[in-house]
């Protein structure tokens, strides 16, 4: 793991484009752009490397701030209620994508994001498209679902599944 650099973006965009084509992540092809992958407001952007090449990416974003729409605000309120911390202390795990050739890269990126969120004094949270394979990926790694929040992703309206770190309740 290392911080993402500007020179990583062309390779990451190729990974992101392939992810969109194979897994519909991101949902919209129009966001396969550097300015979507590397937001100026992010708390952290990191890449996973294997044998000298970038094989994945993850970012942390604040759950609040200017420009957040009603769906993002609702998600933040629900995460805050589920975690017991103010919205300002949440970190949204986002832009997690791998190129698929290195087993465990996604898990390592997720663990890194959780660790960095803790180092920043924030609680990691995330949201996922309900039909995405990623939903099971997160659940198998101990994330639990706390509800949904309607999101508007371009022309797509999605009742995104909200997740927090923690063991599944029996």
Image (tube, rainbow, N blue to C red):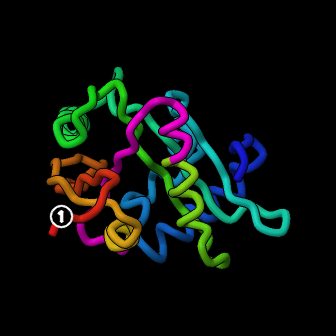
Vertical arrangement, residue 153 with respect to residue 101, above or below: above
Quadrant where the C terminus is found in the figure: bottom left
Residue 151: percent from left, percent from top: 22, 47
Disc 1 crowd, CA 10 A, few/some/many (<14, 14-19, 20+): few
Q: Which residue is mark 1?
A: 169
Q: Residue furthest right?
A: 52
The residue lying at 66 percent from left, 78 percent from top is: 101
The residue lying at 35 percent from left, 46 percent from top is: 125
Report the side of 2 relative to 118 (left or right).
Answer: right
Residue 63 counted in the magenta span:
no
The residue lying at 33 percent from left, 27 percent from top is: 64
Helix, strand or loop at mark 1: loop
What residue range appears in magenta?
Answer: 115-133
Vertical arrangement, residue 35 with respect to residue 24, above or below: above
Report the side of 23 relative to 104 (left or right).
Answer: left
Residue 169: percent from left, percent from top: 18, 64
Choose between 8 and 138: the one closer to the eye: 138
Quarter of the figure with residue 76: top left
């Amino acid at each position: 793991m290392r911080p993402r650099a500007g020179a990583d973006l062309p390779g990451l965009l190729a990974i992101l484009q392939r992810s969109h084509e194979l897994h519909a992540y991101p949902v919209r092809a129009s966001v396969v752009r550097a300015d979507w992958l590397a937001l100026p407001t992010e708390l952290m952007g990191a890449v996973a490397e294997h044998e000298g090449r970038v094989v994945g990416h993850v970012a942390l974003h604040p759950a609040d701030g200017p420009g957040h729409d009603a769906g993002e605000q609702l998600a933040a309120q629900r995460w805050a209620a589920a975690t017991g911390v103010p919205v300002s202390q949440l970190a949204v795990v986002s832009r997690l994508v791998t190129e698929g050739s290195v087993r465990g890269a996604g898990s390592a990126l997720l663990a890194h994001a959780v660790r960095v969120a803790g180092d920043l004094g924030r609680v990691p949270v995330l949201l996922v498209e309900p039909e995405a394979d990623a939903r099971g990926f997160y659940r198998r790694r101990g994330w639990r679902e706390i509800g949904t929040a309607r999101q508007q992703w371009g022309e797509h309206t999605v009742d995104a599944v909200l997740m927090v770190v923690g063991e599944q309740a029996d």
